Image: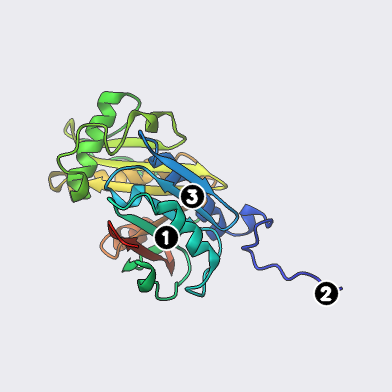
Amino acid sequence: MAEEVVTGWGAREPIDDSVLRAFVFNQADVVRAFACGPGSCDERTDDVAMADGNVPVPYVNMAVLLRPVTSPDDPVLRTIADFYAPATDRASMLFSVWPLPDLAERGWALVGHPMFVVRAPGPVTAAPRAGVEVVDVTASDDLRTFERVAVEGYPIPEAAGSPPGATYPDGLLDSDLTLRLGLVEGEPVSAAAGSVAHGVTNLCFAATLPAGRRKGVWSALVWSRVAEAPELPAVAFTSDDSRPGFVKHGFLPMTRFTLLVRPPSAG
């Protein structure tokens, strides 16, 4: 009997087989954590982790593939379509760490190919610049500030004008995510989230208001999250605009991911 060939992506293979695989499962947990408001739901199979936050913000309604998909006829795509079928009034996203075939006939449009960056374990010796402070978000009032900064700074136009707590409900405070605000001279101007799980530290969200840019607050939030578990690799996926900042902080560009969106009312 021939020995089974290990790919690193089999359902029964260890999550810590690679840093990339560890990130995939960390990100699946992140997606589930963000989708925690009224009417939200999530589901996970051996092939995909799906969450629907019941909000108009696409990245809160995200499916994370847990294995490669090379054909538009792959049955996992039907699983994803069935899960999001009731959500015709809001956009959803499909996240893959591998290239994907053209899925336009299934209603998915390409958003882009964000870069995956990795920093090796190591001590953090950097200190915030004078006038810059990082604080944890632990109460509802702080979370409302986090939400405002995120919506305006990212920006998230789909959430503009939504009631407080609609995008980031209080249930997020009970999750395993670390939420932080960056302050400049006492004024909150940046928001960031991190997740330490499955052997990696995932810098999974950041947004900065124009008033806080180029003042060291983004850097302070990077180091505060890396310092949570300096003995672990730190990872993130980033736009080309933010990529130079990560590289400056010792992160190495590794590979590009694939991000698709299904607009509202798509079949």
Residue 28 got which mark?
A: 3
Mark 1, secondary structure of its residue: strand
Q: Earlier in the sequence, mark 1 or mark 2?
A: 2
Residue 164, placed above or below residue 246: above
- Looking at the image, tell me whether mark 3 or mark 2 is earlier in sequence order: 2
Residue at numbered disc 2: 2
User: The disc labelled 2 sits on which kind of residue?
Assistant: Ala
* Colouring method of the image: rainbow
**First reached walking from the N terminus: tag 3 or tag 1:** 3
User: Identity of the amino acid at label 3?
Assistant: Ala
| Residue 57 drawn at (x, y percent) | 28, 48
Q: Residues within 10 Å of mark 2 (few under 14, many from 20)?
A: few
Measure the C-alpha gap from mark 1 to mark 2. 34 Å
Disc 3 to disc 1: CB gap under 8 Å: no
Is the residue under label 2 in contact with that under label 3 (CB below 8 Å)?
no
Residue in the foreground of this view, choosing between 260 and 181 = 260
Residue beneath disc 1 = 95
